Amino acid sequence: MKTSTLLTCCALFSLSGSVSAEPPTAHFDRILDTRLEATNFAAIQQEWGEAPVMESGQGGEKVYAFCYQLEGETQLTLLSGEMGGDDHQLLGYQLTAQGKEKCANPAKPIVASDVLVPGLSLGMTQEAFADYFGDVSWNKGQPYHYYEWERPLSEQELSGLPPSFRDLVKSGEHSGKADVGLSVSGHFIETAGSKSMNQITVWQVSTY
């Protein structure tokens, strides 16, 4: 697992820069017939096949991940972190061209082009990536875009919170909403005189 790449993606949430103050119209939060923050590693592996979970980083930058081998050398990595809890809630994913990790074969086919939202693809140029978002920021020479918005807390989320917090929501002292942050970052390499994307990573975290 390329720890430095994953940690860089986690660190995007502490950076300022290109921000859209509303949910993305593209469904970046959808992956393998589910949504980010709506399932965990065990549930994914039950449906798509077992894979060893790898751990890297320390403290708040700790990353948990496992990967599936797709067609050719393309690899899909599913991501979680400290905020994902003990059951490793799904917080992100990464699609890599010419991946070098030893990944498990999924129980059913996963097509790389189905993982990414329309308009984004491995091999696209850096210019095309920037044009897609209209505005990007840069972290260690690589572009990313960040979305942030609010959403109502679900009944399941509220039921899992301390009674004192639920009382704050009932009294109106807390809005009953979660702050959601989602980052989309591309990693580009030099090929034939231009930079093409060999990896894309999406992270999403809700706080309240």
Image (cartoon, rainbow, N blue to C red):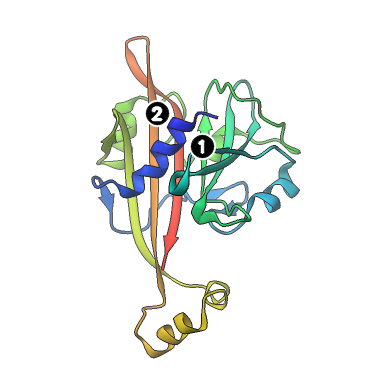
Specify few, some or many for label 2: CA neighbours under 10 Å numbering under 14, 14-19, or 20 or more: some
Q: In front here: 161 or 70?
A: 161
Residue 163 or residue 195, whichever sits in front:
163
Which residue sits at x=60%, y=21%?
Answer: 73
Amino acid type, residue under disc 1 in the picture: Gln
Residue furthest to the front in view is 59
Q: Identify the residue position indicated by label 2 in the image.
A: 187
Q: In the shown orientation, is residue 60 left or right of residue 12?
A: right
Q: From the viewer's side, name the closer residue of 14 and 195.
A: 14
Q: In terms of secondary structure, where does tag 2 sit?
A: strand
Furthest-top residue in view? Answer: 192
State how far apart marks 2 and 1 are (Cα).
11 Å
Identity of the residue drawn at 43% across and 31% down: 4
Rendered location of residue 50, percent (x, y): 74, 41
Tell me, yes or no, whether the two marked residues, 2 and 1, touch with CB atoms within 8 Å. Answer: no
Residue 167 vertical position relative to residue 155 in the rendered view, above or below? below
Residue behind mark 1: 94
**56 left or right of 171?**
right
Residue 58 position, x and y percent, is: 47, 42
Residue at 38 percent across and 24 percent down: it is 188
Residue 32 % position (x, y)? 62, 46
Q: Quadrant of the C terminus?
A: bottom left
